[in-house]
Amino acid sequence: MGGVTQDRVARALLSYLAEPGDRRIGGLLRRHPAADVVAMIRSGTSGLETEDRYRVRLATARPEQHLERAAEVGGRLLVPGDLEWPRQLDDLGDAAPWALWVRGTLDLRLTALRSVAVVGARASTRYGERVASQLGTDLAESGWAVVSGGAFGIDKAAHLGALAARGLTCAVLACGVDLAYPPSHDALFARIAADGLLLSEVPPGSAPHRTRFLVRNRVIAALTRGTVVVEAALRSGSLSTAHEAERLGRPVLGVPGPVTSEQSRGVHRALRNGALLVTSAAEVVEAVGGIGVDLAPEPSGRVDPRDALDPLAARVLDAVPVQRPATLESVARTAGVTPAETSAALGLMELSGFVRCGPEGWALNRPAGRRSGAPG
Amino acid sequence: MGGVTQDRVARALLSYLAEPGDRRIGGLLRRHPAADVVAMIRSGTSGLETEDRYRVRLATARPEQHLERAAEVGGRLLVPGDLEWPRQLDDLGDAAPWALWVRGTLDLRLTALRSVAVVGARASTRYGERVASQLGTDLAESGWAVVSGGAFGIDKAAHLGALAARGLTCAVLACGVDLAYPPSHDALFARIAADGLLLSEVPPGSAPHRTRFLVRNRVIAALTRGTVVVEAALRSGSLSTAHEAERLGRPVLGVPGPVTSEQSRGVHRALRNGALLVTSAAEVVEAVGGIGVDLAPEPSGRVDPRDALDPLAARVLDAVPVQRPATLESVARTAGVTPAETSAALGLMELSGFVRCGPEGWALNRPAGRRSGAPG
């Protein structure tokens, strides 16, 4: 990671002065070292029309204290150029983070390399939570990390599912990595910090604001190979993560639910607009994984041995009565097949155990577990 | 409809001799009048390798009795050339029905013109039945007829939904139109015959066989403008209707459900393979109706007045505390915006009623019903 360089301190300071995703700061950082950008803001020479905004916060800025506070909670500041920096964030262009406050011992770049965003409603249903938790577990067991926010509902369920499988999970927060919002997620965040990673663009001690949640979502989308929406009402904030993923060219996936559920309406609208329907972690991995590497098996039901019969044999078998035996001629007439064809088919099906021939004629062998009755 | 012509009697006879969908008979009927085809079979000169099968049933064939029996139950035989014949059945080529036994007073061609197949599992869930019934009702109220089989589960729910709205509904049966299979659907079929239509390719008195259910499905698919699958396990017969619709170039639609439900797995697989996800009758009608005529409204949630604010005003509003009033300078610092910008934004938002200014500073106006708390 390297020591606390001038660049790192400057980026820590900028993470306090400007709001995450500020494209003006991002643009300036493409052309100048971070320390120079800070100097320009201090001297009022950055040329940015929003410069006065950053200067409002200069008086209370304490970047060294933020770095110390991060270290106290087992955290650190990552900046571009660090080995651990996830370069896929560059896809965000001028809106890319210029620094990430990280808490946890995992390597962020390696963790994010095979990661999927699992996002959804805070006001989730038990169905959605069950699915998100199972997805978290199954993704973890397939060697994929989960990335989500830190909210109630789907976020929490996805993290818990991954943690239960001793998998990797990352929460991208809208507040400082030393805080818990919502406060009742204190213990959850401590577990994630211990076994996974907490990330934030704002310094320790920063409170979450409404707009910070929305801009945070672009980091979730950009870090990961694709975004799965488990439940979302029509105006759910989690859909903004999906839109961001779409803009970045990452796959957007959705888990359907009952059409009678408000919590699935946003997902269903996304699926109608081009998102890919997924029902399992295997299908998620197939969509976001390497081509040809992570193929999900096509789901198929139990095989009915009748389906292996040729059409003529199937017709003859249909004509063998269930209740009492029938003569060859009667079976032939019911089937609409000649007696010779009937005889040949019955003979073969007797060998396969479908039918038996007794003194009163042909009867059906009903194997245990065979489905009863005909369709309607 | 015309009287009982020689052609009609010949086709009634063929509906007894051969199984529905027999492509050899269909091919012969393209080149010869039906009476000639019957004569060829009688004399053993049809040249078909399956001729002996038809001849097995010749001895017991009573087409006039079948026509009388149909009339007794308020039925009739429709044949190609009748005004009422639905010409879209020609899309089935050699597998097209050569006659349809119909019970009910409606005009089949007009009924089928604006019709949708609603199909699904016999072993349905209450969720699926509720959705199928609502679809039936809403399609009926939009002036669309429902076409389905006569089975338990989704078929029944769709018919009942349409009947409840005094709409048009058609059941395509695998047995004669004078029989009820399953027997407990006796009363349901009587209601459909009274207010809608019962259809079958096999003569009155014919029992349903397993293979007849499958070949029957192509008629459901071909009669309608599109097929909606409401619930289907992975090997549900209702998926064969969807495949037939796809082969015919008709839209295949699917209603999703919980991914934890076996009864939705077949639908989800179809949706992953290109079927269109639908959540309402309006979306069904949009997919199968005339282009530009039947557009479903895009679902959208309740509008949050905050969403109308420009980004700077939204940031300032986020910085106005919920609990106690704050000074202009404090709001500006929290928002990361200059005091001048803050003052202008607060002034405009005071006019819109978002905030108020009192002796202690700026405070939030919390309108009734506003969602509480921030996302996580």
Image (tube, coloured by chain):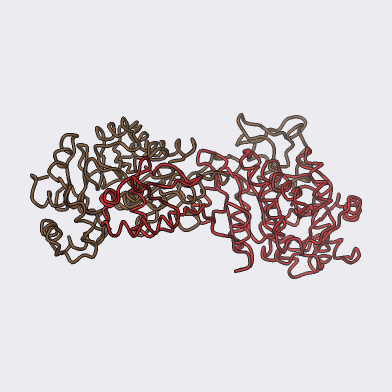
Chain colours: A red, B brown
Q: Is residue A8 above or below residue A56?
A: below
Query: Which residue is depicted at the point 69% across and 37% down?
Result: B373
Foreground residue, B130 or A359? A359
Query: Which residue is depicted at the point 15% across and 48% down?
Result: B83
Report the side of B332 relative to A64 (left or right).
left
Q: Is residue B368 above or below residue A57?
A: above
Location of residue B126 in the rendering, given as x and y in whole percent from the top left corner: 49, 35
Location of residue A8 in the rendering, given as x and y in whole percent from the top left corner: 85, 63
Q: Give the number of callouts.
A: 0
Location of residue A275 in the rendering, given as x and y in whole percent from the top left corner: 54, 55
Foreground residue, A336 or B4? A336
User: Can residue B298 be seen at all in this image of the molecule?
Assistant: no
Location of residue B32 in the rendering, given as x and y in whole percent from the top left corner: 13, 62
Query: Which residue is depicted at the point 35% across and 55% down?
Result: B250
Q: Is residue A161 above or below residue B135?
A: below
Q: Quadrant of the N terminus of chain B?
A: top left
Report which quarter residue B107 is drawn in. top left
User: Can residue A196 be seen at all in this image of the molecule?
Assistant: yes
Foreground residue, B179 or B231? B179
Residue found at the far bottom of this picture: A31
Report the side of A291 relative to B221 (left or right).
right
Q: Quadrant of the C terminus of chain B?
A: top right
Foreground residue, A361 or B311? A361
